[in-house]
Image (spheres, rainbow, N blue to C red):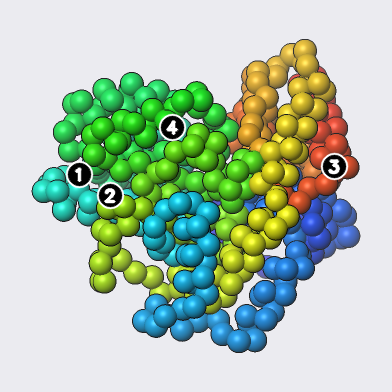
Amino acid sequence: MADTLMATYRRLPVTFERGEGSWLWDAGGKRYLDALSGIAVCGLGHAHPAIRDAICEQAGLLLHTSNLYTVANQQNLADDLVRLSGMDKVFFANSGAEANEAAIKIARLFGHNQGIENPSIVVMENSFHGRTLATLSATGNRRVQAGFEPLVTGFLRAPYGDVESVRAVAHNAPNVVAVLVEPIQGEGGVNIPPAEYLNGLRDLCTDNGWLLMLDEIQTGMGRTGRMFAHQHNGILPDVMTLAKGLGNGVPIGACVARGTAAEVFTPGSHGTTFGGNPLACRVAQTVVSTIEKEDLSGRAAQLGEAILRGLREQLQGVAGVVDIRGRGLLIGIELRQACGDLVTRGLEAGLLINVTADNVVRLLPPLVLDDAQAAQLVSEASGLIRKFLQT
């Protein structure tokens, strides 16, 4: 049979048919512990009863009307996100890339409103912001960009984790209007910046009248032990983007803004056909309420500490292990060598993991992971890594 799908993925040889909580079952009935959550999407796990009920009920009421009309679920979700973030207004899209596109457009328009002809945004090396032309241009990964030149201009790059490098870049570019940064780089290798990095960027942006824009697409919605990762630092961004865990598998993105940044868009300056439809927003409301009601952010913090501690104990002294780091349930195990084969080995063993930046095993289990599953994850991941490094 001819393959009618474009060859954009190197798919693994498995098809999943059903899931429950932190488990998935393939077409042959084999069970897998999901330590990837659809790449940080299914924070509530699979087939969560509250998500199931919200989808079924909303599907029986209304799926789509368009943004030509008021969407009550959209307003209610925006109210929740504003309350939780301390920010002012929200634009809803369909994905993280679209949320970042909205942020980039806010920054551009913010600059033009100040008479800056060619506004620039400082972005970071090893970052990942999406695969649209603007977001891949902002991304600090040449493999993502290769073949799609000419790239979108207006992005200046600085090393991640270094506030002074941002200051130096901006010193030579008077047209800077914003800084776009991930609180923790996920695709870049689970890179955690120095403790005061975000605070330093916040001060720098405030002093220069720039927008601080945080890409929380992977780190948001309880993943790091707080609802939003920047809350560990006690700061407020001017713009924050969300997606992934916000919809638990139903596509949705959000660009949240405050102050001047929240007032930049006016009718006609941005829009979307599907973004913020009744179904997606009803599901996202359910995600938010479930995380709050069950304190899944706190649970992520607790589980993350236990998993990190277990991994460090199991892999202590193992040659080839460079670092074990993480915050909440965003965890990376850096090895001294490329380790993409571990994904297939994990699949064979019934454990779903990911490798990013060539040599970092990335773990993104659901926030609903229980203690026994966490212990199993530590044991199986450690065993796979030890065996891999011995071969």
Left or right of 135? Residue 52 is right
| Residue 71 seen in the current view | yes
Specify the label residue 107 is tagged with.
2
Residue at left offset 67%, top offset 74%: 54
Mark closer to the chain start, 2 or 4: 2
Q: Do callouts 1 and 2 mark residues in contact (Cβ within 8 Å)?
A: yes
Identify residue for label 1.
Answer: 119
Q: Amino acid at mark 4?
A: Leu
Residue at left offset 81%, top offset 54%: 23
Q: Amino acid at mark 1?
A: Pro
Mark closer to the chain start, 2 or 3: 2
Q: CA distance from mark 2 to mark 3?
A: 43 Å
Quadrant position of the C terminus in the picture = top right
Residue at left offset 30%, top offset 35%: 205
For the residue carrying disc 1, how many other residues have a C-alpha within 10 Å: few (<14), some (14-19), or many (20+)?
many
Mark closer to the chain start, 4 or 1: 1
Q: CA distance from mark 2 to mark 4?
A: 19 Å
Residue at left offset 62%, top offset 80%: 58
Q: Position of residue 100 (x, y in %)?
A: 40, 52
Q: Is residue 132 above or below residue 126?
A: below
Identify residue for label 4.
Answer: 198
Q: Amino acid at mark 2?
A: Ala
Quadrant position of the N terminus in the picture = bottom right
Q: Do callouts 2 and 4 mark residues in contact (Cβ within 8 Å)?
A: no
Q: Judge by depth and name the residue closer to the eye, 368 or 227.
A: 227
Left or right of 58? Residue 271 is left
Mark closer to the chain start, 1 or 2: 2
Q: Position of residue 332 (x, y in %)?
A: 65, 31
